Image (tube, rainbow, N blue to C red):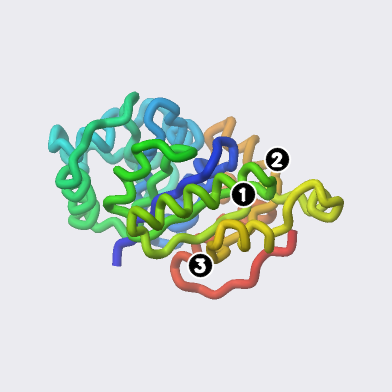
Amino acid sequence: MRKVILVASGKGGTGKTSLTAAVGTSLAEMGKKVLVVDGDCGLRNLDLILGMSDMAVFTFADVARETVSLARAAAAHPVTDGLFLLTAPPEPPALTAAQMCYLADQTLQAGFDYVIIDGPAGLPEELSLYAQIATQGIVVTMPDSASIRGAERVARRMEEQCIMRIRLVVNRVRPRLIRYGVAANIDDAIDISGLQLLGVIPEDEDVIACAGSGKSVVRYKKSGAAQAYRNIARRLEGERLPLMRV
């Protein structure tokens, strides 16, 4: 069954776009057909992280409005088989519920196993737009008070939009800061957000280095954040895995 996952965060800088790219790549390497959608209109950079700058010409709004077919609009990744990108328009589009449902139907007919939407940070109106077609959600936070508070707020908004299964990813974890009491621990993030934990990702400079060069961290690295991303992809597939020690 196809899964449409909305990735959101309460504030910028939590790493949700890197997570979208890496988990999408991991799922494609597992043999799944994956469409990643840049839903951060105006600040789109999913194409840069995927190394697909200027490859995606048409946007998800073009497909929803039936201006172009999904087959033509979805850009195939140049390296990872089974991974496709649909980019965002420069401004939030005025789309109806029927148009969003048409977009979702097209992804189903195209045989995608996963549609992962990299939503905007915070609580903009576009969040409701994507929630209309999402079957589940991922909220990404860092282990600091401001990020966790934002995660709780965006989780409640997603619940109001009737997304039934929402899980938490705690990103950029620095164990030393947690031990010194500078950052919240993982249990705090779970308690405050009220969400089930999907994964924990350690702070890893390789994520920044790979993103800057348009390379996939899960293709070039085996440990650290790369392994955490792969574990999240496997959990989305229903596997039960222990959390990484960070």
Q: Quadrant of residue 245?
A: bottom right
Earlier in the chain: of badge 2 and badge 1, it is: 1
Please state which amino acid type lies under the numbered disc 2: Glu
Please state which amino acid type lies under the numbered disc 1: Ile
Label annotation for residue 186: none
User: Within 10 angstroms of label 2, few (less than 14), some, or many (20 or more) residues?
Assistant: few
Q: Left of 69 or right of it: where is 214?
A: right
Q: Quadrant of residue 90?
A: top left
Residue 131 image offset from top left, x and y in percent? 33, 50
Numbered disc in front, either 3 or 1: 1
Label annotation for residue 148: 1
The residue at the far bottom in this view is: 240
Please state which amino acid type lies under the numbered disc 3: Arg
Q: Secondary structure at mark 1?
A: helix
Judging depth in this view, the residue of 97 and 157 nearest the camera is: 157
Earlier in the chain: of badge 2 and badge 3, it is: 2
Residue 95 image offset from top left, x and y in percent? 21, 37
Q: Residue at x 54, y 66 (%)?
A: 196
Residue 143 image offset from top left, x and y in percent? 68, 49
Q: Secondary structure at mark 3?
A: helix
| CA distance separating discs 2 and 3 | 24 Å
Q: Which residue is labeled 3 in the image? A: 235
| CA distance separating discs 2 and 1 | 22 Å
Label annotation for residue 205: 2
